[in-house]
Image (cartoon, rainbow, N blue to C red):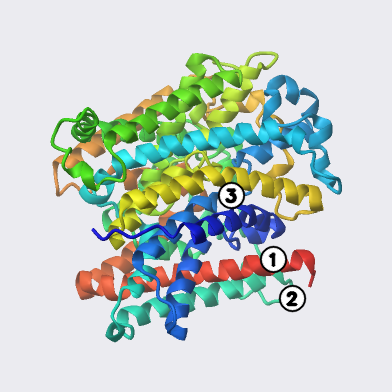
Amino acid sequence: MKVERIPWIPLVILTVVLGLLTPMSALMVPRAASFWYNIGLSTCTEYLMPMSYALLFFLVFLPRIGKKLKFSPSTLTYVYACVVSVAYTSYTDEVFIPPTWWANRYGPSSSISMQLQPWFFAPRPEIAKQLLAGGVPIPWGEWLPSILWWWLVYSLWAFFFVGLASILRRQWVETEKLPYPLVTVANEIVRVAGREKADEKSRTVKWLLLGVLLGLAFFAVLFMILVFPWFPDVFGWRVNMCGFGAAWIPSSSPLASILALGKIEKMPLYVAGLYLVPLSILFNAWFWWMVMAALVQIAYAMGYYTSLPTMNGCGKEWCGDQSVTMAQPFIWGVFANLGVIIGIFISYWIMNRGYVADTIRAALRKGRLLEAEKNEAVSYRTAYAMLLGAAVMLVVAFMFAGLGPATALIVVFVTFLFQFMQVYFLNLLGFLVPAGFETANAFLKPIWPYGPVPPTMEWTVAQDFTVQPGANSPGGGWGFPFLAMTSGFAMAGFTGTKPGNVLKVVLFAAVLTPLLAQISILWGDYTFGSTKLPGYGSFGSGPIDRLTSGWYDSNPMSTGGPFMWWPQALAGAIAAFVLYYLHSRFIWFPFEPIGFLMGISWTNILYELWQPALMAWVIKTVTLRIGGSKMYDSLGRPIAAGFIIGYALMAVIGATIGVVRFFIPF
């Protein structure tokens, strides 16, 4: 393996620039547009990071026009790993923790926030309220405890997940050979850098550029529709549309009689991304949604789901205990996002117990992996030391924040469980499928079946940590270093880059980024005022304001008390066990648990991902039937990846225009 020195100076500059620019640029772009047009992490389900693709495209194709510069695949790998590590700071939702906890001090619950959350989570209310209007100097002394606390927590999680990724690198990259759709898109660009001059005009590059042009064209038109009211709505995007690209079905529509169907998904970007996913998973995704839809219809005939026919599309997922996800008898949200998740998690570690045992033996300086360890990013002993050391320090930090030992351990375990599952699925699908926002606090029910009256600090902090940064999404920051590190290892595998160098780049960026992001947001708020930043979204209120005792008591999606959901959770776990075993035992068995969860998960029900999965399955099947894997590699995959790259280029352009409009309205 070729050893190449890390270009630290440009990477440090890149980390600092993007660490400061990414969160603030997202806050300057209007909320509706920033869902698609920002430079960091866009959308809530397809975890695309536009700047990572756009910058690689610039570095590879611009020098080929000027013929003066050429970057090696290893250098491009370091750039990709660095940019991906910073991307989550543009995720301006309640899950990006520091700003939402700061909002507790100036939101409706500011009078009780000091009693329900530690003083170092955010400064005093009178200081926090300065964020609203800005225009005063930043009192850094008041903010320093909060900045240092959140920086410490994010950094500890970075060490935890980098250690975990290092342990799993060999298994995921070399043994399981996960498809890594998100990384595959970036690698299509990097492959161009490694081509000989004669190959630059090959069909593969042409198809890639065709996809880029298609993606640019579509998202340029969509940008005009979203930003300029005078532009004709040629995509029908202004009527009954959800921000993520689906048209919701009104209750008066004939389609509303299909009770599990809430929307028609119109976003071609999802089809392009899912085209890169294995066929077996795509088949299971749409097949199991249809099974679920049939079961909902049968249950309706038996007297359940009586409110669904009168609900508009979005209500079928969101509207309380009568929605598809929350209503008896299935409580699909619990069945999938708790039961099936637990079943897959346990099955995975049972099936791979031999590999785990081998890594432990290697950490003890014995066993068959000692020789292979030389090719790892760090020794297994170091990886386990990072993982376990960070876990112990996190428990101590959470106890310092008011949690008891048992509660702190639960928070760490829940974070490990859900972030592992989410990143595993992202590396399989490129889409965020398992979501624990409305089910993760099931693990706290044995301690608190109901919320204490009045609420206590331990209960409040434990619940907020569990459902938001712990289980909701890697975009919350705690689990994002796991995605960044596994993506970096995958790219290193594609390009032949030394994994240890990629680890250093990711760990550096992952530790520095939380500090830079907090400084950036504070500077923006004190300079412009948060009320004047159009992308602020959910930062206007904190978890105490939004997540009440009643909300926590009624979850996980319970309709009859804190433990009435256990049959559905148990059934989901058993279903996952059975599918996992049969799929691994019999090669011919067509059903598997990954697509099963994708088909029935809350995410699929919300985004209707089964529709683009069906389209991608048809297109990919035709591709393979006509031209086999050669046609897929030389035509299908480059076009799909190119479409995503075209989107990324337009996302960066659109975000830049949005920032310019913030300063110079037009």
Q: Return the residue at label 1.
A: 658
Q: Which mark is residue 89?
A: 3
Earlier along the polypeptide chain: callout 1 or callout 3?
3
Residue 440, percent from left and from top: 49, 30
Residue 265, percent from left and from top: 50, 60
Along the line of sight, the residue nearer the viewer: 600 or 169: 169
Q: Is residue 539 above or below residue 441?
A: below
How far apart, in angstroms, are the residues tagged by discs 1 and 3? 17 Å
Tag 1: amino acid: Gly
Tag 2: amino acid: Trp
Residue 432, percent from left and from top: 45, 48
Does residue 77 appear to the left or right of 3 in the view shown? right
Earlier along the polypeptide chain: callout 2 or callout 1?
2
Residue 108, percent from left and from top: 79, 32
How far apart, in angstroms, are the residues tagged by discs 2 and 3? 32 Å
Q: Residues within 10 Å of mark 3 (few under 14, many from 20)?
A: many
How far apart, in angstroms, are the residues tagged by discs 2 and 1? 17 Å
Q: Which mark is in front, 2 or 3? A: 3
Q: Which mark is residue 230?
A: 2
Tags 2 and 3 touching, CB below 8 Å: no
